[in-house]
Amino acid sequence: MLQRLAVSPCIPVHRNPTRALSYRPPVCVQAPSHLVKRRSANFKPTIWHDKFIQSISSEDKHEGRNKEKVTKLKEEVRQMVLKEDLLRDKLELVDALQQLGVAYHFKEEIKSVLKGIHVSMTQISFSTVGDLHITSLLFRHLRLHGFSVSEDIFNSYIDNKGDFRIELSSDIQGMLSLYEASYLAKEGEEILEKARQFTTKYLKSYIDNSNRTCNNSREKEHVSHALELPLHWRMERLQTRWFIDEYKVEIKMRPALLELAVLDFIINLIQTSFKKELKDLSSWWTDLRLYEKLPFIRDRLVENHLWSVAFTFEPKHASLRKVQTKAICLIALFDDIYDVYGSLDELEAFTDAIEQWDLSAMEKLPEYMQICFMVLFNTLNDSAYDILRQKGLNIIPYLRRAWTDLCKSWLAEARWYHGGYSPTLQEYLENAWVSIASIIVFSNAYCMDGDVTAKDLEQFSFGYPEIARLSSMTFRLYDDLGTSKAEIERGDVDKSIQCYMREKKVTESVARQDIRDMILKYWKLMNTQNVGNSVFQEYFRNVALNISRMAQCIYQHGDGYAEPGQETKDRVMSVLLEPIEI
Ligand code: 0FV
Ligand code: MN
Ligand code: MN
Ligand code: MN
Ligand code: MN
């Protein structure tokens, strides 16, 4: 029996009315739907039309031959992993597999390599290894894979004043690896915090110096890429796409590994599968014809699928990805109704209907909301039906719980807004980690994974795992940094930035910097979550990390979701659509 996800401490949401929900603004008079004065966010239409999506070729002319080739290459690479015997070579290989996006084929082998190193750690002398690069790689991969490893591993690099030894700063490869490792820090780890500041400072000055000397080396390119964002925070598929091109010119490049990575990315059911999923989803979305009744809709099907791919890219999760994309389409629609389009009376009624989960509850709703209710009812029941049929598990209660919690958190925000109430930062955050909607993504990911058992579900019924709350918190803060300007202009409840400014009496730029620091703190808390290292535990933790990574990515340059520009378009192209030259 696999050890299951540690769900303590559990986070029940809205089991008892929170302060947020007990706040009620002055009563409004129920008005007939056509008399309600409605606002609109004027979202731009999608740039990805169904006709285009259906015209994308998802056929692989050489499917049979390529699959055979992949099987052969996989075996070749497996042998490499098993045969490597030097510590440095082992770790560099594991790292390459990870960054090339093919580590998922070799989970068992990688685990056993790391386990072998971990049990013999006491015999490795890190000062004689003397190699900051290797120590850092070792630390990062052990942490990533759930092995316990202390930050004291870096003690031999610290001088008697407690700082990292200044001569290390000339070892750029070591500095880069230490920089990446420092992002695996847990809350309160001071050596790693020092490592992050030390490496960031010297890597920045390395870039400044090489700018002066017009040095355009690959090393410089690697350092800038890392300074832009550490590996631990990067969306996996985008990093893979970048790394494959880098790896092509790597001195230690192994042709079999490169070929496997390229074939796997585009052919071995990954990109090909994404395209097929997208075509099915686009038919579903188009056939719903929602825009006829809901002309204000934020139509972002393709961007939504990019989110789903970011959460779980493995081929075996294709049907989960479709469920997630559908859910995100509905989340965006409902969110706009709560934020902008609906009247408070309507939102109260809609929230009740979702809680009752009964078609008769629909009758009291205005027509446009009946459409919304029914599309959720059908879509959710449909995906739950598949799990009931395949595994004999009824997951409806868990999905209902998530949607009810979500609607209640949206309602709380609507009550605040319509009542002219400004929440404290704490009140806001207690509600806003739910209203960012990732509890839906988590519930789907948890209940619909192929390995889920009745026992897991029972455990899930006690509450959302802490790592889900932490990851949702980062998503919320990234979202507020990227979207709150437009939200406040159009009329919305104060978001974290505004609550923070008001409470601390600081300027917007100070608030933004402090919120970035809060995000770093939540990342450290996520790293602290020891969820165990069973397949299911690692999978679920990865979903959590990936939600934060994707949120960081989509809001990196503003609101890449509601107002997707060239950045988002390029990301869709390179992850979902554009093949790699072989
Ligand atoms: C949030 O939009 C957003 F990015 C949505 C709804 C799409 C992705 C959602 C998931 C992956 C769960 P918005 O900034 O309008 O949300 P808030 O909560 O700020 O209204
Ligand atoms: Mn469309
Ligand atoms: Mn919104
Ligand atoms: Mn909202
Ligand atoms: Mn927002």
Image (spheres, grey):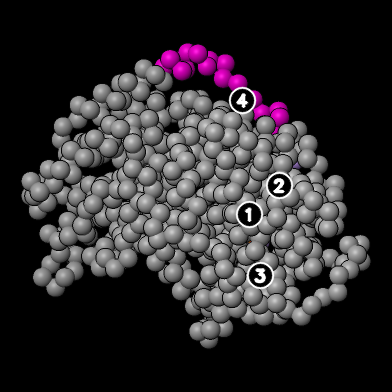
Quarter of image, res 332 = bottom right
Mark closest to the chain's N terminus, 4 or 1: 4
Between residue 17 and residue 439, name the one nearer to us: 17
Q: Position of residue 260 (x, y in %)?
A: 39, 26
Question: Does the numbered disc 3 mark a residue whose Cβ is under 8 Å from ligand 4?
Answer: yes
User: Mark 4 and mark 2 in contact (Cβ < 8 Å)?
Assistant: no
The quadrant holding residue 308 is top right
Circles 3 and 4 in contact, beta carbons < 8 Å: no
Q: Secondary structure at mark 1?
A: helix
**Callout 4 crowding tier (Cα within 10 Å): few <14, some 14–19, many ≥20:** some
Mark 3 lies on residue:
413
Q: Which residue is mark 2?
A: 376
Task: Name the foreground residue: 524 vs 232.
Answer: 524
Taking the spot 79% from the left edge, 51% from the top edge, the residue there is 360
- Would you place residue 403 above or below residue 311 in this image? below
Q: Specify the label residue 58 is tagged with.
A: 4
63 drawn magenta = yes
- Residue 24 location (% of width, % of height): 70, 77
Distance from disc 1 to disc 3, alpha carbons, whole Å, reads 15 Å
Badge 2 element: helix
Residue lying farthest to the bottom in this orientation: 505
Query: Is the residue 393 above or below the residue 206 in the image?
Result: above
The amino acid pointed to by label 2 is Leu
Residue depicted at x 23% and y 47%: 138
The amino acid sitting under disc 3 is Glu
Residue 403's tag is 1
The CA span between labels 3 and 2 is 21 Å
225 sits to left or right of 313: left
